[in-house]
Image: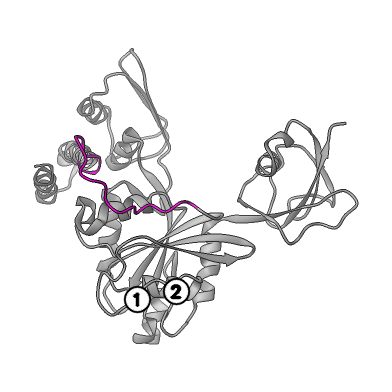
Amino acid sequence: TITEKIAEIEREINRTQKNKATEYHLGLLKAKLAKYRIMLLEPSGKSGPKGVGFEVVRNGDARVCLIGFPSVGKSTLLSKVTSTHSEAAGYEFTTLTCVPGKIHYNGADIQLLDLPGIIEGAAQGKGRGRQVIATAKTADLILMMLDATKGIKQRSLLEAELEAVGIRVNTQKPNIYFKVKKGGGISFNSTLKLNYLNERLVYTILHDYKIHNAEILIREDATVDQFIDVVLGNRKYLKCLYCYNKIDQISIEEVDRLAREPNTVVVSCESDLNLDYMIEKIWQQLSLIRIYTKKRGEFPDFEGGLILPAGTTVEQVCKSIHRTMVQEFKYALVWGVSTKHNPQRVGLSHVVEDEDVIQHVKKI
């Protein structure tokens, strides 16, 4: 079976010594492993009878997924920070389906999904693992719930499960240009010295995926895994916030050490400790901004602001209000941090900042 083949390749990778001589062999094994994992995640053939629906309709300005092992406090957190009640008890697998809740913060509606606990082997489909991880792929941010009373191993186990299904946390997409062509063979170029990849290895990996005509330009010192991610093209690069729960059960020194780690927040759901700071960190990680609109001769509307991603241009602001606004656009007046003086007359390409006020002027 495919699962046995995956296990065999993983054993082979662990057995092989990692040095310059074995790099090529390891690269081929990793390519095969990625191929089998896709076959496992996307099984062909007839599906069985339809089960209970799991996916939740996307709602609000952003979506955050709670991921963690059973009984780390995901449901308790959801009940504390949203108005939704999720069943919480002292035994594992209290939550069996996806429970959505909503956090209202800075005028934004952030959808928080409480997912069933992940167990080891979730990527192979154990304990509804596939549905849990597939739902996590649709999120803007993953909130990884960890138990502060347990060791550091839980975090690497969860990351390994996410990695196995093509979710890459807190990493950027590799700077590699890759395009499959109709003919002309494989053209391979790089703009710098490569330590992990070479032309022979790239050719063999592509042949393994039955790609014989392609254009490749590598602009960073990428590893074999990163190159395979680009070839497959179905990887999801998501931000992840590590949330350590149950800090009221560990020493203050340990809390201090955990709190200083990057992308980490420490909380206690039972004792209501630090939950407001966690919501603030979620807001920062989502990189959302608020834009207020203003009509001519009136005060700005500070009640119903627009919630948009950071780096939004005036054109995208107009489209989010109504798609015809761009055709009628003459210029916009902007007050706020993004301008040199207030108000500044700007065009469609102007990038707006948090809490800017914008007034749209139409063509006559």
Label 1 packing within 10 angstroms: few (<14), some (14-19), many (20+): some
The quarter in which the C terminus is drawn is: top right
Looking at the image, is mark 1 or mark 2 earlier in the sequence? 2
Quarter-of-image position of residue 321: top right
Where is residue 54 drawn, in percent x and y?
34, 54
Asked whether residue 212 is drawn in magenta, I would say: no
Q: Is residue 152 above or below residue 231?
A: below
Where is residue 174 drawn, in percent x and y?
40, 40
Task: Describe residue 39's horizontal placement relative to residue 267 as left or right.
Answer: left
Write the start and end of the magenta stretch as one range.
40-58
User: Three-letter amino acid code at disc 2?
Assistant: Ser
Residue holding disc 1:
88
Residue name at image x 63 percent, y 55 percent: 289
Kind of element beneath mark 2: helix
**Front-most of 359 and 167?**
359
> Magenta span: helix, strand or loop, mainly?
loop
